[in-house]
Amino acid sequence: MSVALAANAPATFEIKSAQLPLVALLLKSADLAQLAAEFAQRFGDMPDFFDHDPLVIDLTPLQAGGQADSPVDFVALGALLRQYRLQPLAVRGGNEAQTAAALLAGLIQANDATVQRGSSAPAPAPATAAAAPVVETQATPVAPTPAPGALVVDKPLRSGQQVYARGRDLVVMAMVNPGAEVIADGHIHVYAPLRGKAIAGARGNADARIFALGMDPELISIAGIYRTSDTPLPASVQGKAAQVRLVPGPDGEKLVIEPLNP
């Protein structure tokens, strides 16, 4: 005989699962002085690049790079990250001593957190031998939130000017002069000569690309992989219409620059 028990729902709260978009810091060295110098070089002139984003510290590269036993000063690391408006919450991939130090510093252990590059569509659930019964419910349809449109810049960008398209593509209709910088979390399109710096996929989107009608940049970067003007471009793309994309290879990802009209 089955018995139905009455349930009392709390009037003041509910507990539900939630998904939080996290930024991941893949720590390749425990040398915080070098890390601070490279953060200053990369983000020192972009104080608004991060917007108090929650962050997980991934120590997996330390294990793979021969620094598995290197101690990490998580208190100092957290202070450094907060200077750049990052909020460290969790740690993953460390050894027992590193994880214990992280917990003492107020972080939580999140070894189940996954770090992906590019698009992050959820993986399909694995099939099971006996499927659970499906309960059909009628839900109120919710209109999907449209993706933000591209940020369009109509005027030339002079030396010292910087434009950042957070969470979207960037379209520049005029010249990007030397000393100017264009940054986007998505693609960058420059319908004019590109002579300054262009950083696409700024938050790790390896599928982002850079397009320009006159490719002559001081620096190009996609998902952290960069190339400077110290290495001249091939004559087939120098000053011409071209695109830049990331291509995986046996030695890791590399930038490939191709003419738009081969």
Image (tube, rainbow, N blue to C red):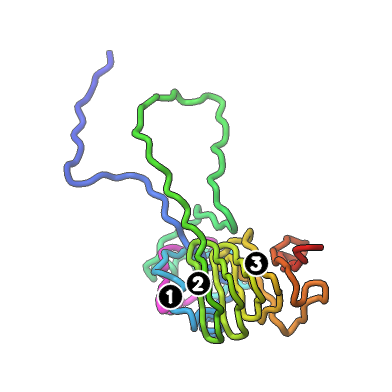
Q: Position of residue 145 (x, y in %)?
A: 42, 48
- Amino acid carrying label 2: it is Tyr
Q: Are marks 2 and 3 in contact (CB under 8 Å)?
A: no
Q: Characterize the local packing of mark 3: few (<14), some (14-19) or many (20 or more) Cα atoms within 10 angstroms.
A: many
Please state the extent of the stretch shown in magenta in the rendering.
Answer: 72-93
Q: Earlier in the sequence, mark 1 or mark 2?
A: 1
Q: Earlier in the sequence, mark 2 or mark 3?
A: 2
Helix, strand or loop at label 3? It is strand
Can residue 191 be seen by looking at this rendering? yes
* Mark 2–mark 3 distance (CA, rounded to whole Å): 14 Å
Identify the residue under disc 3: 210
* Mark 1–mark 2 distance (CA, rounded to whole Å): 9 Å
**Nearer to me, 121 or 22:** 121
Q: Tell me if residue 181 comes above or below residue 210 in the rendering.
A: below
- Label drawn at residue 164: 2
Give the quarter of the image for residue 87: bottom left
Taking the magenta stretch, the answer to whether it contains residue 80 is yes
Helix, strand or loop at label 1? It is loop
Q: Is residue 73 left or right of residue 15?
A: right
Identify the residue under disc 1: 48
Number of the front mark, 1 or 2: 2
